[in-house]
Image (tube, rainbow, N blue to C red):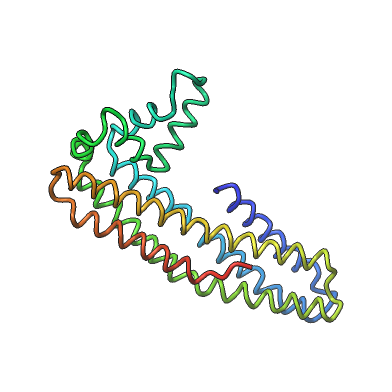
Amino acid sequence: MITLKHTALSVFALTALSACGSIHESPTRSQATPMAFAASSQYAEIDAQAASLNRMADELVRKSTGKGAVIGASLGCGLGLISASSAQKCVTGAVAGGVVGAVVGHEHGKRKVAARVAQVSKQELSNTLLDAGKQLSEIKQTLPQVLAQQNAELARLKQQKAANALSQEEYDTRFNAIRDARAALAAALSESADKARVSADNLGTAASQGQSGLMWHIGEAKRLEDDSMSTRSQITLL
């Protein structure tokens, strides 16, 4: 996920620079250059915001499952049958993915969920939820401008291509950069929503097992899921 986003950003920045290098070839390209640089800068900002949101969502999953999640993930991976390096990858992926189903399904399962959450500070969980909500708000503020700049750049690319001021190869490179950047951002928001949903489900299970004081946390996790998906819905994939 991170690789796709960073690759898209690198190509996006490169196309902005290539536009700058060709300003003497046509007035149309000269006019596009400032916007290309602005779009690259704006995307870099929102790319970093999305990566930060995903890290916070990972924290939510971890904190909503507690220390027992690693034990459950290990059991689910069948550690006795695979190498140490493969085991690490499996457990890391399982915990990051919120495999509470695997945890609950094992012999240390449902009876222990509430106890696992009890090991986690509710204040820490609250802080992460608030930070994630703030980060998502910043993304929501930045996103419309980024999308508008991308749409304007796409329109310019079409005009340049129609006027034979841009080769098919150049057009494809710059179009694909915008397409990939947009797809990566949409995927990041969807991933954050999924992780927020897993966290809410984890906490809901804990509450049903008798852990008290989690209703606010559950509500905030669900709101983060809804807001992430709502923000994702603003992005039209190319």
Q: How many marks?
A: 0
Residue in the image at 53% along x and 69% along y: 235
Above or below, comparing residue 77 to residue 96 in the picture: above
- Where is residue 134? Give x, y as percent: 34, 62
Quarter assignment of residue 147:
bottom right
Q: Is residue 188 above or below residue 60?
A: below
Residue at the top extreme, as displayed: 80
- Which of the pair 52/27 is nearer the observer? 52
Q: Determine whether, in the image, residue 136 is placed left or right of residue 47.
A: left
Question: Where, quadrant-wise, is the C terminus in this rendering?
Answer: bottom right
Q: Is residue 3 left or right of residue 84?
A: right
Looking at the picture, does residue 172 appear above or below residue 74? below
Q: Position of residue 199 (x, y in %)?
A: 32, 49
In-front residue for pair 41/224: 224
Q: Residue 87: x percent and y percent?
A: 47, 25
Report the front residue among 49 and 229. 229
Residue 177 falls in image quadrant? bottom right
Q: Is residue 120 above or below residue 132?
A: above
Is 45 positioned to the left or the right of 221 in the image? right
Q: Nearer the viewer, residue 82 or 117?
A: 82
Q: Residue at x 60, y 51 (%)?
A: 4
The residue depicted at 18 percent of the width and 47 percent of the height is 207
Query: Residue 168's x, y, as percent?
Result: 83, 68
